[in-house]
Image (cartoon, helix red, strand yellow):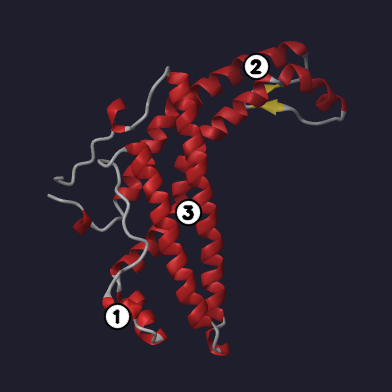
Amino acid sequence: MNGTIKLDTATDIPGRTGNWATQGAVAAGRGMVLFGFTLASLVLWTVLLTAVALIPLGVGLPLAAVTLRAMRGLEAKAWRHVADWCGSAAVAPRPAGPARQEEREPSFWVRFGSLMADPDTWRSLLWSTVDILAGWLLTLAPASLIAWGLFGVIMPGVWHPIVTAHGSNWYAFIHVTSADTAWLSTALGIAFIALGLLTAPWFLRRYAALARSFQNPAQYPN
């Protein structure tokens, strides 16, 4: 590979069969799975910060080492999914952790030192931070559009109870106060669903490109 990521054609995503709606639904579902990995990364980051706080008590370093390895393993699993779903040109999985001889020694300090000296450990931390702060927007956006659209579709059946309960019922830019405006929301909801399905493969490719940029270039042949 020459460093250029080509992700704009249908053949870049394996298994893309069916019409655009089916492809979009599959891509949106895959985005939700990747969002689950992001949530797991957030939990591990919380544990890691707790471990750092516990270092003065003597239990922080072992907990930090276990957590870092778990983060590496979680990241490798997530990237395997991205590789399967977006093709090897988008991203390739890397090992969950280094396999050096000294890693198999019983000494905790040797294993911990090797883990901290591995650039991939810091690359993993950086990627998980970016994923938690911004990457999740790419994986969750299509499903959010579809869900928001479904709310608009069912608006004719729910608008009256909301208004009766003195709720302020706005759907996007439509103030829903009658059956007519509820049906307008349905039409807009269908448009949101279509937008979510149409853009889901694009969002998945962008997420793959983002993940690819944080991997070790040495893993890819020239």
- Above or below, 101 against 190 in this view is below
Residue 62, percent across and down? 49, 81
Determine the residue positioned at 44% across, 48% down.
135
- Front position in the image: 75 or 49: 75
Q: Earlier in the sequence, mark 2 or mark 3?
A: 3
Give the residue pinned by disc 3: 133
Q: Quadrant of residue 216?
A: bottom left
Q: Secondary structure at mark 2?
A: helix
- Front position in the image: 58 or 202: 58
Q: CA distance from mark 1 to mark 3?
A: 34 Å
**Marks 2 and 3 in Cβ contact (< 8 Å):** no
**Marks 1 and 3 in Cβ contact (< 8 Å):** no
Give the residue pinned by disc 2: 186
154 horizontally vs 122: left or right: right
Q: Amino acid at mark 3?
A: Leu
Residue 53 visible (yes or no) = yes
- Front position in the image: 190 or 167: 190
Residue 39, percent across and down? 54, 53
Q: Which mark is residue 102?
A: 1
In this rendering, the label closer to the viewer, 1 or 3? 1
99 horizontally vs 219: left or right: right
- Above or below, 79 against 184 in this view is below
- Above or below, 78 against 156 in this view is below
Q: Amino acid at mark 2?
A: Thr
